[in-house]
């Protein structure tokens, strides 16, 4: 077995040793697998022997209800690879033959997992005419869906919130799901600001200005799931059966490998194709013997719902992300007065953050967005130290540390100009505070024998780009289209020939997104002069080159604006908007604070861009100039060539006439 | 009266020009399929005798019509030996598995996507053409149609057609193939029900037997069969007789060109070993124009068959449409070749594998 085997979720007696402490929160979900047995008496590969070692097997308890599709139980690769070889193959007892399964329990497609990916897949299938006309679909969910069904869209925000990209929203609209969304609970993200702030004197910032349509919408997973469920109940009568609280205790390939038998309770069901939408520790993946590769990040994500006063001028529709040496901290709008946070940081930091009091956490989060990095590092070090001795920091202590560290360093430690900042928060909704470990993983294949994997079962990703759920929705869309194309031509839905297009289309794309996000994670975390220089320069250049920014935003027709990126001599130094800062915001003549006036980098007529010239600016201009030049030269060449050939033709004609 | 043997190409050219001028010269056009040296039997000096088997003096092999058969015994034993591999998607019949969706796409285009005769085109709802076409071509578009799959092998095509709602009869001359097809279909949850209700049926028989039993079908398919039978002319006529008025005759086969020699025989069989060597015989391949011309000359012409609207102005003595089907190794799929009727490029696509479609008049 290869080294990557270690990362598959094969449970072993000793496997609990390799889970990090925080991942023990749900040990039952880790161990939930199906025994792999086959109805035929063919020799069973050793992998399945290992898997059948699992004792009590409960499926359907894991779901990908996570922020951005991330929830992972990190375990180290080296520890579990050593245990794989140690498991001795034990003989499988001869299985009880599958009883005859009646037509009422026979389905064409069985979806396992009733979270985002599973429900979206059912909706996607219902939108395909041939599938809807000629197949029976079953959706199995381990727990009850009543919580989703009875979600009212009122009250506190859930902490599982995902950003849905414009592309996916358009698709959800086209399949009739979006009309069921509680629109008041879905916030458009019009702009985005990203910055890495290694030292107080430089602020490489990328600002993605409005596109004309929202870049994405922040939507609670519950909101999306309820909409999907309503759509299924609206059009899926007689096509999609939903079985709630149905745990699969056994899965077996039927005779001739033409169907998969599933034991649900005491009942056997069969399906031509089983789709695993059952989360990162996918039992379907285990059944298919598909291995996963990837690694755990030494990072946990802390999520919380934040409250802040509404801005008098601008709608709260800007997403912010700051890259700290410990990981990114994101601020994502929910409505005028509420936003959500995802702070990816070291496990001990996450633990310390969660143990803070409400006020202390508020100050800490503000500091996380607004404090210079050196001061923030001192603060978090103190926080971890205090947490380890069992005395979490209080607000006063935090304020003391902040002012001490700001005073101790020289006067310029509060920079002349802060990057554009998210609003200062006033409180944190404490029940929403939670943390989960992060992990990169990608299944080696998406297809097994009569099985297919979608969403988190196939891949998990760092949430910094907010792509987890979006990748899952794209998987589901492509798989439904593939099945429709196969069915239209009479294909057997579970066969490799019918399904081949799905991994062909999705695997390279998913891999690209996964590896790009992984690299971004490391590039933005790193703090050393060389990487800093490259990153800073890279960000400056990206921010200045409009075409490149357009590509990054993935939007056509966008007009990227330029953010004044280094200190401008004409504007007075603006104070940092730290609640505990000694400086009070300076009120300008028009009644606005300087920070508000310049908010989100909207350029004002009086802002002169001329003095933002640095050599990076020159580099950026020359790159842009090169593209322009290339275009102009190409056009001129075309015209000249056309004239020349026309002239030649005429000359030849004239000669011929003579 | 036996004609002096002339080089084949010259003969064919003459027919084209001749018939274009005078349709009365039909009796001389009876040999498009049988004049090919590959397809004539050693005992036959006269091509006409072959195409009219019933009038020819009975030989030992074809004593009466009931025992007469175009089945080649060695071909049958070849495919019987391979029968266990029919459903291995990565094995001997990998290319055939991948070809199957494309063949059905062609059937869909011909059977389902064409507007029905009742459906009148009007300027007002021209913009709904695409919608109507999508509606016709999705869902169970074959329901209510009786289909015959001659040479069904392991039942690749039959199973797919059955899922589309048609009533399917699969016929194969190899008993072991029929066994495989039956077993395989019964293991499928959906198809086993269709087999129980008689919607899908596999029979160890031959096309001739079915014809003699008077069976008629809306769609008659013979995929990759023509190049494996003796006397393809007889075989074609037999298929043609089983098509109901308004029904479709759809074939796929291989052309006899240097390209097919290279791709099918040299590459696929001898070099890459995708297919067992000896599966195909170059001399048995049939060119597209020979097939089209044979249906015109020997199977009733335009009295029985519809004209190919796309080519009616350039070909006056041919019936049906041929279309190339080519394997794209990068995508791992077969694709239907495009091109304008009569153009060089369309001919290139038909240089190896191609589909044939003809529709009977109502």
Image: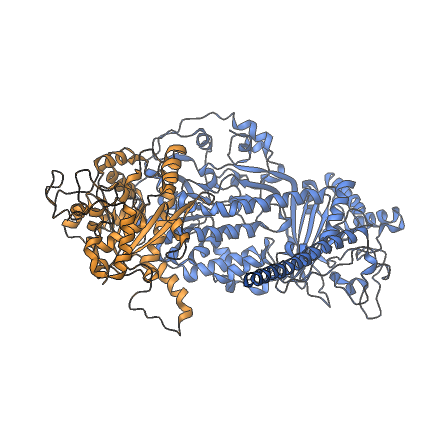
Q: Please state which of residues A420 and B94 is positioned toward the viewer in this rendering.
A: B94
Q: Residue at x 84, y 47 (%)?
A: A405
- Residue B100 lies left or right of residue B183; in this view the side is right
Say whether residue A474 is visible. yes
Residue located farthest toward the bottom when viewing the structure as drawn: B124
| x, y percent for residue B42 | 19, 37
Q: How is the image coloured?
A: by chain
In this rendering, the answer to whether A349 lies above or below A231 is above
Residue located farthest toward the right when viewing the structure as drawn: A410
Say whether residue A271 is visible. no
| x, y percent for residue B252 | 31, 48
Q: Residue at x 42, y 30 (%)?
A: A45
**How many circles with numbers are drawn on the protein?**
0
Chain A drawn colour: blue
The chain letter of the orange chain reads B
Q: Please state which of residues A278 and B334 is positioned toward the viewer in this rendering.
A: B334
- Residue A447 lies left or right of residue B280; in this view the side is right
Q: Please state which of residues B104 and B306 is positioned toward the viewer in this rendering.
A: B306
Residue located farthest toward the front when viewing the structure as drawn: A658
| x, y percent for residue B11 | 26, 49
Please identify the quadrant where the C terminus of chain A is shown: bottom right
In this rendering, the answer to whether A554 lies above or below B91 is below
- Residue A13 lies left or right of residue A235; in this view the side is right
| x, y percent for residue B165 | 29, 54
Q: Please state which of residues B136 and A108 is positioned toward the viewer in this rendering.
A: B136
């Amino acid at each position: 077995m290869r080294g990557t085997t270690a990362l598959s979720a094969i449970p072993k007696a000793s496997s609990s040793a390799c889970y990090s402490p925080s991942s023990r929160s749900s040990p039952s979900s880790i161990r939930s697998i199906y025994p792999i047995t086959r109805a035929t008496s063919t020799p069973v590969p050793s992998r399945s022997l290992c898997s059948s070692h699992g004792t009590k097997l409960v499926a359907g308890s894991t779901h990908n209800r996570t922020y951005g599709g991330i929830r992972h139980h990190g375990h180290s690769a080296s520890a579990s690879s050593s245990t794989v070889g140690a498991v001795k193959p034990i003989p499988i007892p001869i299985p009880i033959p599958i009883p005859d399964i009646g037509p009422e329990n026979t389905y064409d497609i069985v979806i396992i997992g009733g979270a985002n990916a599973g429900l979206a897949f059912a909706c996607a299938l219902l939108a395909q005419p041939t599938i809807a006309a000629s197949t029976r679909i079953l959706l199995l969910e381990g727990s009850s869906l009543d919580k989703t069904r009875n979600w009212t869209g009122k009250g506190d925000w859930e902490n599982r919130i995902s950003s849905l990209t414009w592309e996916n929203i358009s698709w959800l609209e086209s399949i009739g799901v979006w009309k069921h969304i509680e629109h008041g609970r879905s916030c458009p993200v019009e702009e985005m600001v990203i910055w890495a702030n290694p030292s107080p004197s430089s602020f490489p910032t990328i600002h993605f200005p409005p596109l004309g349509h929202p870049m994405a919408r922040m939507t609670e997973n519950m909101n999306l799931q309820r909409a999907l469920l309503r759509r299924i109940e609206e059009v899926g009568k007689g096509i999609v059966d939903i079985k709630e609280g149905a745990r699969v205790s056994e899965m077996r390939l039927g005779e001739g490998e033409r169907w998969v038998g599933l034991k649900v309770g005491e009942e056997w069901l069969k399906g031509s194709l089983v789709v695993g939408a059952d989360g990162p520790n996918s039992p379907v993946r285990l059944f298919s013997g598909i291995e996963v590769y990837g690694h755990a990040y030494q990072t946990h994500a802390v999520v919380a719902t934040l409250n802040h006063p509404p801005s008098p001028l601008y709608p709260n529709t800007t997403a912010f992300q700051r890259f700290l040496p410990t990981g990114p901290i994101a601020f994502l709008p929910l409505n005028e007065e509420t936003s959500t946070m995802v702070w990816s940081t070291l496990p001990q930091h996450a633990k310390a953050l969660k143990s803070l009091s409400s006020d202390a956490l508020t100050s800490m989060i503000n500091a996380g967005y607004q404090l210079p990095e050196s001061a923030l590092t001192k603060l978090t070090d103190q926080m971890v130290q205090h947490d380890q001795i069992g005395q979490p920091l209080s607000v006063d202590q935090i304020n003391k540390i902040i002012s001490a560290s700001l005073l101790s360093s020289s006067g310029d430690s509060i920079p002349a100009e802060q990057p554009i900042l998210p609003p200062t928060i006033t409180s944190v909704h404490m029940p929403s505070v939670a943390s989960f470990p992060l992990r990169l993983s990608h299944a080696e294949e998406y297809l097994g024998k009569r099985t297919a994997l979608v969403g988190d079962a196939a891949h998990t990703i760092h949430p910094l780009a907010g792509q987890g759920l979006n990748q899952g929705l794209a998987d589901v869309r492509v798989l439904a289209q593939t099945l429709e194309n196969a069915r239209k031509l009479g294909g057997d839905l579970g066969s490799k020939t019918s399904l081949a297009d799905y991994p062909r289309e999705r695997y390279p794309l998913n891999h690209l997104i996964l590896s790009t996000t992984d690299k971004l994670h490391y590039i933005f975390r790193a703090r050393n002069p060389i990487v800093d220089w490259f990153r800073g320069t890279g960000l400056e250049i990206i921010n200045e080159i409009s075409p490149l920014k357009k590509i990054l935003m993935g939007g056509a027709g966008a007009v990227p604006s330029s953010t004044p990126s280094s200190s401008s001599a004409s504007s007075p130094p603006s104070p940092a908007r730290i609640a505990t800062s000694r400086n009070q915001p300076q009120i300008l003549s028009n009644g606005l604070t300087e920070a508000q006036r310049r908010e989100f980098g909207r350029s004002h007529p009086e802002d002169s861009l001329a003095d933002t010239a640095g050599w990076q600016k020159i580099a950026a201009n020359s790159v842009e100039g090169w593209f322009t030049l290339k275009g102009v030269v190409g056009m001129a060449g075309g015209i000249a060539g056309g004239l020349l050939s026309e002239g030649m033709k005429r000359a030849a004609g004239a000669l011929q006439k003579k | 009266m036996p004609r002096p043997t002339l080089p084949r190409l010259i003969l064919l050219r003459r027919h084209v020009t001749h018939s274009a001028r005078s349709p009365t010269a039909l009796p001389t056009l009876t040999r498009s399929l049988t004049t090919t040296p590959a397809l004539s039997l050693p005992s036959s000096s006269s091509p006409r005798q072959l195409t009219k088997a019933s009038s020819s003096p009975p030989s030992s092999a074809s004593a009466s019509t009931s025992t007469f058969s175009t089945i080649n015994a060695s071909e049958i034993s070849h495919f019987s030996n391979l029968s266990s591999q029919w459903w291995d998607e990565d094995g001997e019949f990998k290319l055939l598995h991948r070809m199957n969706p494309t063949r059905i796409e062609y059937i869909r285009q011909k059977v389902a996507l064409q507007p029905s005769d009742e459906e009148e085109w009007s300027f007002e709802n021209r913009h709904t053409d695409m919608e109507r076409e999508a509606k016709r071509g999705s869902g169970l578009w074959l329901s209510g149609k009786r289909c015959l799959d001659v040479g069904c092998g392991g039942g690749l095509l039959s199973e797919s057609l059955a899922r589309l709602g048609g009533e399917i009869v699969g016929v194969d001359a190899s008993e072991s193939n029929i066994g495989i097809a039956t077993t395989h279909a019964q293991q499928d949850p959906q198809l086993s029900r269709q087999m129980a209700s008689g919607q899908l049926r596999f029979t160890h028989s031959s096309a001739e037997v079915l014809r003699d039993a008077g069976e008629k079908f809306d769609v008659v398919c013979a995929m990759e069969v023509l190049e494996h039978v003796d006397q393809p002319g007889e075989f074609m006529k037999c298929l043609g007789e089983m098509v109901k008025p308004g029904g479709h005759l759809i074939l796929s086969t291989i052309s006899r060109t240097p390209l097919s020699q290279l791709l099918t025989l040299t590459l696929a069989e001898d070099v890459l070993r995708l297919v067992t060597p000896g599966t195909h015989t170059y001399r048995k391949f049939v060119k597209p124009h020979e097939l089209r011309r044979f249906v015109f000359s020997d199977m009733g012409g335009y009295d029985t068959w519809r004209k190919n609207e796309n080519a009616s102005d350039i070909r006056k003595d041919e019936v049906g449409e041929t279309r190339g089907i080519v394997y794209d190794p990068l995508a791992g799929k077969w694709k239907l070749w495009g091109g304008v009727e009569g153009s060089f490029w369309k001919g290139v696509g038909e240089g190896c594998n191609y589909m044939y479609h003809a529709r009977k008049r109502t």
